[in-house]
Amino acid sequence: LSHLAVIDVCYASNNVPKMLANLVNQKRTISFVPCIMQTFLYLGLAATECLVLAAMSYDRFVAICHPLHYTVLMSWRVCTSLVVTSWACGFILALVHAILLIRLPFCGPQEVNHLFCEILSVLKLACVDTWINKVVILAASVFVLVGPLCLMLVSYIRILCAILKIQSKEGRKKAFSTCSSHLCVVGLFFGIAMVVYMVPDSKQREEQEKLLSLFHSLFNPM
């Protein structure tokens, strides 16, 4: 939970101040290096959050389905390993995206049609074919979105089966309340990310994606 809080604070701090500055300022510019850094941090923190949320679903599965073994299965060492793996995988993926982005030549209109330097909007400014970048984005999306989501679904199906076996109403209510906030965040975070990065692009969806990204950057951290 503490790492999720840190990720969300950093995630909002990476995008929101510049967005607010752009709302009140007529000169809405950002230089190349800060733009790439914003993209790198956005992708790194988003990927890390996906993996941390997956680790949290495993934590809830163990707490509800194997309560007597919880302290063994979720020891300090296991928790540390899960967190370190999440941060490392998230930022290694972001670094790959940033390196592939830096190697592209940008010679067209230098206007990012987005609220911040979002990778798909920045790629549209490149003068060459960006199919490699798009393939890597799709592969990364499968790794950090589809994979963890499948693990979470399995965890929550097992949790639901365990909750339905609880005899007392109070016990069921307590178990459901333990999972409800996590499920809300997972639904919003993964749902929006999959719409933005895995659904084929179209001109009609550009404005919708801006609103979804804004919602993604503000609502989930809040």
Image: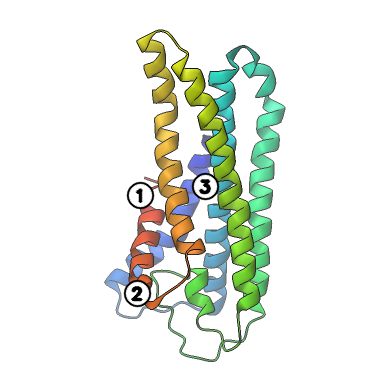
Amino acid at pointer 3: Ile
Q: Nearer the viewer, residue 118 or 186?
A: 186
Alpha carbon distance from label 3 to label 2: 31 Å
Q: Which mark is residue 61?
A: none
- Residue furthest left as drawn: 24
Amino acid type, residue under disc 1 in the picture: Phe
The residue mark sitting in front, 1 or 2, is 2
Tell me if residue 73 comes above or below residue 88 in the rendering: above
Question: Counting residues from the N terminus, which is met first, the one under dot 3 or under dot 2?
Answer: 3
Q: Which residue is mark 2?
A: 204
Residue 67 position, x and y percent, is 58, 15
Q: What residue sits 41% from the left and 12% below the top?
A: 171
Q: Can the viewer see residue 56 in this picture?
A: no
N-terminal of the pair, mark 3 or mark 1, is: 3
Q: Nearer the viewer, mark 3 or mark 2?
A: 2
Q: Amino acid at mark 2?
A: Gln
Q: Secondary structure at mark 1?
A: loop
Helix, strand or loop under label 2: helix
Q: Residue at x 56, y 26 (%)?
A: 61
Are the two marked residues, 3 and 2, in contact with CB atoms closer than 8 angstroms?
Answer: no
Residue 58: image x %, image y %? Answer: 59, 31
Q: Is residue 53 above or below residue 36?
A: above
Please rate how many residues cluster around mark 1, counting C-alpha atoms within 10 Å: few if below 14, some from 14 to 19, many from 20: few
Q: Nearer the viewer, residue 146 or 13?
A: 146
Image-based side of 11 in relation to 204, left or right: right
Residue behind mark 1: 219
Depth check: give the residue in front, 202 or 73: 202
How far apart, in angstroms, are the residues tagged by discs 3 and 1?
14 Å
Determine which of the numbered discs, if any, sits on residue 7 in the image. Answer: 3
- Toward which corner of the image does residue 104 lie, by quadrant? bottom right
